[in-house]
Amino acid sequence: MNYELLFSELTSRRIRIAITGASGGFGRSFLVQCRDIPALEVVALCDINVDGTRSLLNTLGYCQDAEVCHSADEARTAEASGKAAIVNDFALLDALSLDMVIEATGRPEISVQIAINALKRGVHVGMVSKETDSVAGPWLNKLALENSAVYTTVDGDQPANLIGLITWAKVLGFDIVAAGKSSEYDYVWSAQSGQLDYSGRKVDAPELGACWGLGDDVGATLAQRKALLSSLPLSATPDYCEMNVVANSSGLIPACDAMSYPLCHISELADIFIPQEEGGILTRTGVVDVFNCLRRDDEVSFGGGVFVIVRCKDDETWEMLAGKGHVVSRSRKYACIYLPYHIMGLESPHSIFSAVLHKRASGSTTQAVHAVMAGFAERDIKKGELLEMGGHHHTIEAVSARLLPKADAAGLAPYYLLSDKVLNRDVKAGELIPLEALEMDNSLLYTAWQQSV
């Protein structure tokens, strides 16, 4: 694909954008790339942390004449003078002339309102807040189409990257057995010291050497690795959310409610994410799943990347490709095709160009729900308790995630609909939390969910 030809209009077009949640990690990576693309004009940056946003711009040496605006009139004055407006109230974005809003607050109730406001006035929306997309994405797609706008996941983040890889494989006629991603951090082992490092946490694991190879019994090897590293986190809430977005966008269903999370090497993926009767772990095919990347400290990372497992339809072709170093199963019946990177906002401008220049989503325009990320009570939760979302990974205290096919999730509350809601009854440990256990008040996210299903 020649991207200069694909987006040739960039040489003569200015694209006016706003970014919400501007001071966060995604916002920084996105702005770093924007400053090197003349066609992109940042009209507004919205964040409750105004000082942090100003500091970020100064650090990057970008939009340094941006003005803090407290009213619609001030925002319009900044726009007229060619200066970016820094605002802490997303409602002020409605006063500005925009082509697209990049939504990255990560706060579902706020995020869905920002998206609705933009789409209803024909402004495209790039949804970085996967928490919102997992609940309201299908309905927001419908709203976009009704208003001649584009709603899309954003390239650079794992859901959009995996949707891209899945659709690439489908267009080429591949038979997809499974699709997935690595969890956020690698499990990095030193053969010399016997220590394993997981995001700065180190554990002694000299016994890993004995099960480093997959062996003949895949299940037994994976169980042994898991037992050796059981003191470390082996799953992450954002993974379920991202796979929910991908499932809804692709029609693939969850491999299992808890996701499989095998600790494995890149070279083993085509032997693991295949049917059990073929020696793998899958009880069904056409699924989404997640793995934990296990590697030595002298091996390359998967980089938070994405993969598809496809069936090999010609022995000679895949034998040749295996000889070139591609990941092919030992049986030569399956192959893994993967993208070993996850570079966040650095890649996101592609989604802006696709939406604004071509009126096409770089993600999916699906209006269907295929899977539901539900909340699993880790302990007894009492009536009146607030289910508060917090932390870098946007977890909810005392609630873990599960990902179910839509058919198995009737009456259950989507995980991020639980966020900042109060329970109107007790919920027992081990219970999947139902919608009827929540006090909804005037939840806009709930309204969007009702329209989705």
Image (spheres, rainbow, N blue to C red):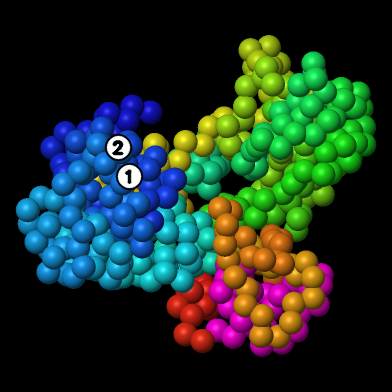
Does the CB distance between marks 1 and 2 fall below 8 Å?
yes
Judge from the rendering whether residue 104 lies leftward or rightward of residue 388; answer left or right: left
Callout 2 secondary element: helix
Image quadrant occupied by the C terminus: bottom right
Q: Is residue 317 above or below residue 167?
A: above
Judge from the rendering whether residue 133 lies leftward or rightward of residue 45; answer left or right: right
The residue stretch that appears in magenta:
412-440
Q: Is residue 448 magenta?
A: no
Q: Is residue 434 magenta?
A: yes
Q: Which residue is mark 2?
A: 60
Q: Which residue is mark 1?
A: 56
- Badge 2: how crowded within 10 Å, few (<14), some, or many (20+)? few
The residue under label 2 is which amino acid type? Answer: Leu
Judge from the rendering whether residue 80 lies leftward or rightward of residue 19; answer left or right: left
Q: Measured from the top left, where is residue 8 in percent x and y?
A: 22, 33
Q: Is residue 327 above or below residue 403?
A: above
| Residue sitting at the far left | 81
Q: Residue at x 77, y 36 (%)?
A: 263
Q: Measured from the top left, where is residue 138 in percent x and y?
A: 48, 65
- Badge 1: how crowded within 10 Å, few (<14), some, or many (20+)? many
Q: Measured from the top left, where is residue 102 in percent x and y?
A: 35, 54
The residue under label 1 is which amino acid type? Answer: Leu
